[in-house]
Image (spheres, rainbow, N blue to C red):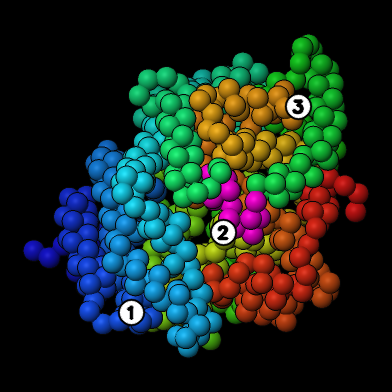
């Protein structure tokens, strides 16, 4: 029988036929796809005709269509709905895929053809987009080690294979720790918790098969528990479990894995002639060098730490008023910060949450996209990989633009965090294809599902990534959508968060779950005034993580990453009551793969631009200014990686911003 993954997909918009696919289909589908891709690569490499853009670069762009189908389906379900079979498959696939792609990059005949075209690029009469694709293809081969010979070439393949295996292990260990730990709560333990936290704890208990409510390590549950539970002993227990993920000893401990990853990255960079992995990694980013990254982070660190230190004194005094002596601890900060927010801004998250219904916030994100880019969203009734998922047909002026899928709820089979991915990317070659884009979040389930303000921000953030994919309008898939510099990719997502704070958006869509009444004007004003509340804490926990990531990669790989982490935090005088947002054993951004390695700073680099980019709309006097929206789409959202990121931003804004816009946006300096 034909494997349903590899057969023609006759579903609406050729969405993967999830209902027909079983876990047993993945391994044979991958083997068949690998064989087909190898045959295509061999045909390109061994073509007897002289190398041309069409028979080499475009042929590479067109190759691997079966691989795309297999991997898009598999990585979607293995990240968002894993099970033991899929975890085993992932462990088996990682070295196999690494070997496959290493084989392509070490194919000397293929590299000679690409290098030949690169030498003759000025005589090829290429379009700007074709020239860009040629440059990126050639650069990708060189950076993958294609020019290496002999033992160096062999060692590079070994390193890449081992890194793939280690990244998979790191991810699965973290998922196992998150899935297996939970803390039972008695009815007495629920005292002081708002209803939405109690409801989430009961729902989590049902999912875990517990006798009653539980706290899990899902961010959407543990953070509000730390905010609202008056039980300091339970906050301490939960916080320590949360921060111990990946560092509990035994088979799921990630500390030795992190050390090995850092050593192999350093060796990989030096094989390619770079002095450090950070130098290698940042060469292709907007920042370019480790020094520029450190300069940005330290410009922000000073004001952020000063604010956090002042806040710590206030929270310590509040704690002492409760009769608790001794220092403010990390499991105290969120609790007393929430009490302070309620006191200073008269803003009670328990009262706010009923106005932030998930369905209404989805509508708000869609409405903003309609007003800015004329996109319309119609529900699709199609089989997806989990019953929690929803799909929409995205159109503009009656023309199909994309399929958007939302998978919003936390569950034990889903890795933590939130992300956006394209199950199919936009392209015009070799065939015109519209994207299939998915947002995955970890919100607490409820009826109705209610979000924190932070959750609502996350929803808008990930939808900003989705717009980058959906509005892409380039020829070649390799430069489509979010295929841009890592420190530029967060600009559209962080920029889109600003529309959540537009008063008219909240006025229309922040309606009470029971009464349907709009958020009262005084509450709306308090929400907006409190938007920068506790930014000292949030900025410190983020910048500390980014500085540790940079330190791991800009010099010699540390023999003991945990000791190096402690050294960095001591060197910047990290406040004792604030933990890193991502400590090393659960720093998946950095260790689950190379994506954000030496690049966690990129959120802040993009934020420098997003504060300035939204100011362009404010200067136009209208958050939904059509001229600015068109400029944003034409110069950033539709262009993918067709030009250098700096060039794209300059085309949109006319200049590059300084760090002051970020500091003002976070309320860390006076406006």
Residue wearing tag 2: 284
Residue density around tag 3, few if under 14, some if 14–19, many if 20 or more, within 10 Å: few
Q: In this view, does 29 lie above or below 94?
A: below
Residue density around tag 1, few if under 14, some if 14–19, many if 20 or more, within 10 Å: some
Q: Is residue 365 at all visible to an observer of this figure? A: yes
Q: In which quarter of the image is residue 5?
A: bottom left
Separation (CA) of disc 1 from disc 2: 26 Å
Task: Find residue 387 and report its horizontal and vertical position in percent.
Answer: 36, 53
Question: Between 155 and 624, which is closer to the camera in this rendering?
Answer: 155
**Residue, x 50% and y 49% (percent of image)?**
273
Judged from the image, the secondary structure of the residue bearing numbered disc 2 is loop
Q: Earlier in the sequence, mark 3 or mark 1?
A: 1
Q: In which quarter of the image is residue 524?
A: bottom right
Separation (CA) of disc 3 from disc 1: 57 Å
**Residue, x 30% and y 62% (percent of image)?**
108
Residue wearing tag 3: 573
Q: Is residue 184 magenta?
A: no
Q: Which of marks 1 and 2 is in front?
A: 1
**Residue, x 82% and y 75% (percent of image)?**
620
Give the left or right position of residue 140, taking residue 649 as reference.
Answer: left
Quarter the C terminus occupies: bottom right
Q: Is residue 370 above or below residue 173?
A: below
**Residue, x 56% and y 59% (percent of image)?**
284
């Amino acid at each position: 029988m034909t494997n349903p993954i590899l057969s023609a997909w006759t579903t609406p918009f050729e969405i993967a036929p999830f209902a027909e696919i079983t876990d047993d289909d993945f391994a044979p589908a991958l083997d068949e796809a690998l064989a087909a891709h190898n045959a295509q690569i061999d045909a390109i490499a061994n073509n007897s005709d002289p190398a041309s853009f069409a028979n080499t670069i475009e042929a590479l762009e067109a190759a691997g269509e079966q691989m795309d189908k297999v991997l898009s389906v598999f990585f979607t379900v293995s990240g968002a709905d894993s099970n033991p079979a899929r975890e085993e498959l992932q462990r088996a696939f990682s070295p196999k895929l690494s070997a496959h792609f290493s084989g392509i990059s070490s194919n000397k005949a293929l590299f000679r053809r690409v290098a030949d075209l690169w030498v003759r690029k000025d005589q090829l009469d290429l379009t700007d987009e074709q020239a860009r694709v040629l440059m990126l293809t050639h650069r990708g081969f060189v950076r993958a080690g294609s020019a290496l010979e002999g033992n160096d070439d062999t060692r590079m393949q070994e390193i890449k294979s081992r890194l793939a295996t280690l990244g998979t292990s790191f991810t699965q260990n973290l998922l196992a720790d998150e899935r297996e730990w939970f803390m039972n709560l008695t009815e007495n333990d629920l005292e002081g918790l708002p209803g939405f936290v109690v409801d989430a704890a009961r729902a989590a208990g049902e999912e875990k098969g517990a006798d009653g409510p539980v706290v899990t390590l899902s961010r959407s549950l543990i953070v509000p528990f730390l905010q609202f539970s008056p039980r300091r002993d339970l906050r301490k227990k939960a916080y320590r479990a949360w921060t111990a993920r990946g560092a509990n000893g035994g088979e799921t401990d990630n500390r030795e894995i992190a050390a090995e990853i850092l050593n192999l990255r350093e060796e990989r960079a030096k094989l390619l002639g770079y002095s450090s992995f950070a130098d290698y990694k940042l060469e292709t980013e907007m920042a370019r060098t480790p020094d520029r990254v450190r300069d940005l982070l330290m410009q922000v660190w000073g004001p952020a730490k000063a604010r956090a230190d002042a806040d710590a004194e206030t929270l310590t005094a509040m704690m002492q008023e409760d009769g608790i002596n001794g220092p403010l601890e990390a499991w105290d900060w969120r609790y007393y910060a929430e009490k302070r927010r309620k006191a200073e801004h008269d803003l009670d998250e328990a009262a706010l949450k009923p106005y932030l219904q998930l369905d209404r916030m989805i509508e708000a994100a869609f409405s903003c996209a309609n007003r800015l880019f004329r996109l319309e969203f119609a529900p699709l009734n199609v089989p997806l990989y989990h019953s929690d998922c929803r799909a929409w047909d995205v159109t503009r002026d009656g023309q199909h633009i994309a399929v958007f899928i939302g998978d919003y709820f936390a569950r034990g089979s889903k890795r933590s965090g939130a992300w956006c991915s394209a199950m199919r990317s936009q392209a015009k070659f070799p065939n015109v294809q519209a994207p299939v884009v998915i947002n995955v979040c970890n919100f607490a389930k409820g009826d109705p599902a209610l979000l924190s303000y932070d959750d609502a921000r996350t929803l808008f953030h990930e939808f900003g990534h989705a717009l980058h994919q959906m509005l892409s309008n380039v020829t070649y898939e390799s430069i489509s959508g979010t295929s841009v510099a890592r420190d530029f990719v967060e600009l559209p997502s962080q920029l889109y968060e600003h529309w959540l704070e537009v008063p008219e958006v909240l006025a229309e869509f922040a309606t009470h779950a029971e009464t349907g009444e709009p958020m009262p004007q005084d509450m709306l004003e308090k929400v907006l005034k409190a938007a920068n509340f506790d930014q000292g804490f949030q900025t410190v926990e983020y910048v500390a993580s980014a500085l540790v990531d940079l330190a791991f990669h800009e010099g010699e790989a540390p023999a003991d990453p945990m000791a190096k982490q402690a050294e960095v935090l001591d060197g910047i005088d990290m406040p004792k009551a604030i933990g890193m947002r991502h400590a090393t054993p659960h720093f998946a951004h950095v260790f689950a793969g190379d994506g954000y390695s030496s690049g966690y700073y990129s959120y802040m680099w993009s934020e420098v631009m997003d504060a300035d980019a939204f100011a362009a709309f404010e200067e136009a006097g209208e958050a939904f200014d059509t001229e600015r929206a068109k400029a944003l789409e034409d110069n950033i959202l539709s262009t993918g990686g067709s030009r250098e990121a700096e060039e794209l931003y300059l085309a949109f804004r006319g200049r590059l911003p300084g760090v002051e816009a970020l500091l003002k946006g976070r309320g860390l300096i006076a406006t």
